[in-house]
Amino acid sequence: MKRTVILGAGASKSYDKSKTGVRMPVAIDFFETFRKLDISKNPWVLIGNIITYISERNNDDILEFLNFSEDIEMLHSEIQEKLYEALKRGNFFSKDYDVRLLKSFNELIFVFVSVINEIQNGDVSKPHLNLAKQLSKNDSVITFNWDTLMDRALKSETEWNIENGYFVKPTAIFNDEWIKQNGNVIDNEFPKLLKLHGSSNWLTSHLQPSEEGKLELSQETDAEDFYVFENATKPYSTFAGRYMSGYEEFSFGYYPPNLPLKGKEAPEGYLYVRSRIKNPLMPEGKADDNGLPSMPLIIPPVKSKEYDLFGTLFTQIWNEAQREIEIADEIFIIGYSFPKTDIRTDRLFKSAFIKRTTIPKIIIINPSPELIFDRFIYDYGIPESHITVKKEYFDETFKFE
């Protein structure tokens, strides 16, 4: 019996062991959740360009951000669209407004991942631990979530490891230092974890405008090269030395460790200059800042998802996810709502089911399963007799039976 488990936001909402006492947000309550966390008051957490963008757009006082409650997906998508328009116009760095768009876009990625890291920084999730205990080496977990709740549970309860557990091979893993990885992913004796939108502990280099008017990574290596954070028990090299302590495995403070890389060379006739204005009110970091500044590697919650920015990395992951859906005997849908706007996910399931020679069993675990149930019948052609619905929340009592 081969099982594939699909995890959505509802699965992450089950986590109640955070040191912050806060649960994972959804798009509409993201900024409200952010303000509940201590990081919202930390001067190292950069939100200045986000606040400026919102206040200028709404013609509001900057302090109105204290009550800001827009959907983060809508805001991030809006900034992305304006950023792309600015890149197409050319002469990008000649206009302060265009540069602030890029800074706002990146700040949203950092803040988004920082909120996740703060909330998941606690004991290992019991619902995810229980799920991990029931998985065999033939099973797989496909997740649309960015958190590492499932990662930690698999590591705790199985032989799963970062080196081979993500299907794609990291270039290096940070465990108090960068450890380079060699060779291909080996056949595993543990469940497979496929993260379709990246992960809060995956790292890459910063985004910068290219000569062609597009965004590109600042690293000198291939775009699909990625780096994974596992643990830090001592200060590491990071931007401005702003290391933050007190985090469990798979979670870090606002600033991740710098990458053991060089950045791309500037185009002929140009020179990259890295500078930072020191603010007397800003606490100075005490770690060093060697290496290339890094940022989280995620596909952010925007309408236009730029998977190709990372080369073939996500193509490999999505192709493997389709293969897992094609061959699974049972497919469990936990906390994922199948939004119609997610065209790529719709295509993933349709392509997988078309290639199947048998009809799988579909088990839906969701307190509001009606639309998902209809989706599988009318869009994916699964007979009602092959669908089981459990109208409940995902928690530590979940059983495959």
Image (cartoon, rainbow, N blue to C red):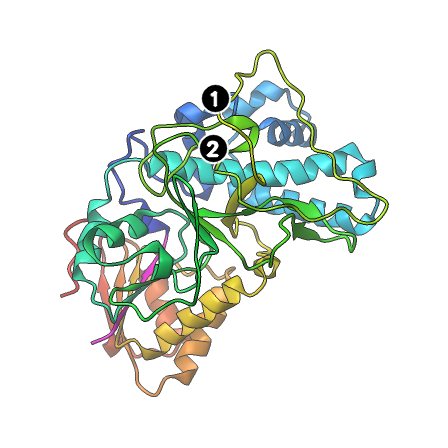
Q: Which residues are magenta?
A: 1-8
Judge by depth and name the residue closer to the eye, 228 or 320. 228
On the image, the x and y values in percent for residue 122 come to 27, 35
Pointer 2 or 1: first along the chain: 1
Judge by depth and name the residue closer to the eye, 238 or 384. 238
Judge by depth and name the residue closer to the eye, 380 or 261. 261
* Residue 103, placed above or below residue 324: above
Q: Which residue is mark 1?
A: 42
**In the image, what residue occupies the spot 66% across and 25% down?**
276
Residue 346 in sight from this viewpoint: no
Is residue 394 rendered magenta in the image?
no
On the image, the x and y values in percent for residue 228 come to 43, 49
**In the image, what residue occupies the spot 38% across and 60% down?**
166
Q: Which residue is mark 2?
A: 254
Around disc 2, counting alpha carbons within 10 Å, would you say few (fewer than 14), some (14 to 19), or many (20 or more)?
many
Judge by depth and name the residue closer to the eye, 378 or 223. 223
Q: Which mark is residue 351?
A: none
The chief SS type of the magenta part is strand
